[in-house]
Amino acid sequence: MGASLIQGFLKSTAMTIVSEIGDKTFFVAALMAMRHPRGVVLTGALLALVVMTIFSAVFGWAAPNLISRKLTHNGATFLFFVFGLRSLWDAISNEEGESELAEVEAKLGRTDDIKKKKKQQTSVFLSPVLIEAFSLTFLGEWGDRSQIATIGLAAQENVVGVAVGGFLGHALCTSAAVWGGRHLASSISERSVALCGGILFLLFGAHSLFNGFQVA
C-alpha cells in the first residue's frame, strides 16, 4: 500500500509537471497574473485543477470496475506511447507553444475588453477575475493530455497517490506561472520540455507494458 502510493504519487507529479509547463493553462495563469491580482488568479486556477484532478483520478480508478481490467491496462499503455510520440513530435516541430500562447493572448484580450466596462465586485469568490481564471483553466484542461494521462495512471496506480501527485504538479506549475509570468515562460525551452515529456511518457508506457507481460 505504502509503496504503491509513493509510486503513484511520484509518477503523477512528474507526468503533470512535464505536461503542464508551457501548456495552454500555464499561459492562461501567466498572462492573467500580469493583468490582475495574482492571489485571485492563482485561487481560481487551483480550484479548477483540484476539481479536474479529482474527477480524472476517480474516473480512472472506477474504469477497471466498469470495463475489463486488461482492457483499461492496455488502453492506458497505448495512451502513454501515443502521448510520448506526440511530445517528441512537438519537440521536433516546436510550434505548439507559440500557437497556444497566441491563442491565449487573443482570448484574454477579448475578455479584458468586456471586463473594462464592469466594476470588480468586493467578494473574492464572486470576482469576475476568479471566475475567468477558473473557467479558462477548467476548459483548457478538459481533454488535455495531462487529464487523460491522469485517468490512465489512476487505472493502474494507487488513486490517492495519483490524485495528490497530480495536484502537487499542477500547483507547482501554476504557481510558477503566476509568480514568474512571461519571463519564466520565455526562459523555458519548449523543445526541451516536450523532449523530456516524450521520454517520460514512453518510459511509463514501457513500464506499463512490462507489468502487463508479468500479469499475463
Image: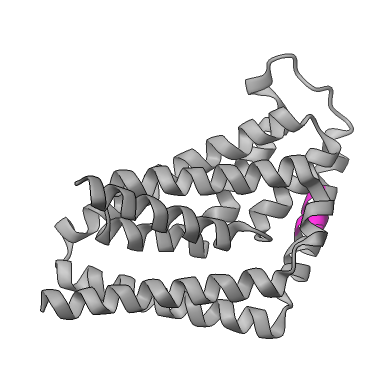
Residue closer to the observer: 55 or 214: 214
The quarter of the displayed image where residue 40 is located: top right
Q: In this view, does 134 lie above or below 8?
A: above
In the drawing, does residue 30 fall left or right of residue 162? Answer: right
**Residue in view at x 73 percent, y 54 percent:** 27
- Viewport quadrant of the C terminus: bottom left
Position of 173 relative to 24 (above/below): above
Q: Residue 140 at what x, y percent from top left?
A: 60, 54
Residue 29 at x, y = what percent? 71, 45
Please provide percent x and percent y for residue 72: 24, 68
Residue 198 lies, with reference to residue 7, above or below; the image says below
Q: Which residue is depicted at the point 54% across and 35% down?
A: 47
The residue at the far top in this view is 122
Q: Decide if residue 36 is in sight here.
A: yes
Per the picture, the main secondary structure of the magenta-coloured stretch is helix
Side of 101 where 161 appears, left or right: left
Q: Where is residue 89 in the image (x, y as percent from the top left)?
A: 60, 84
The answer to whether residue 143 is visible is: no
Kindly identify the residue that appears in the image at 28 percent across and 48 percent down: 5
Quarter location, residue 192: bottom right
Check residue 115 for magenta coloring: no
What's the magenta region? 104-108
Report the number of discs: 0
88 w.r.t. 11: above or below: below
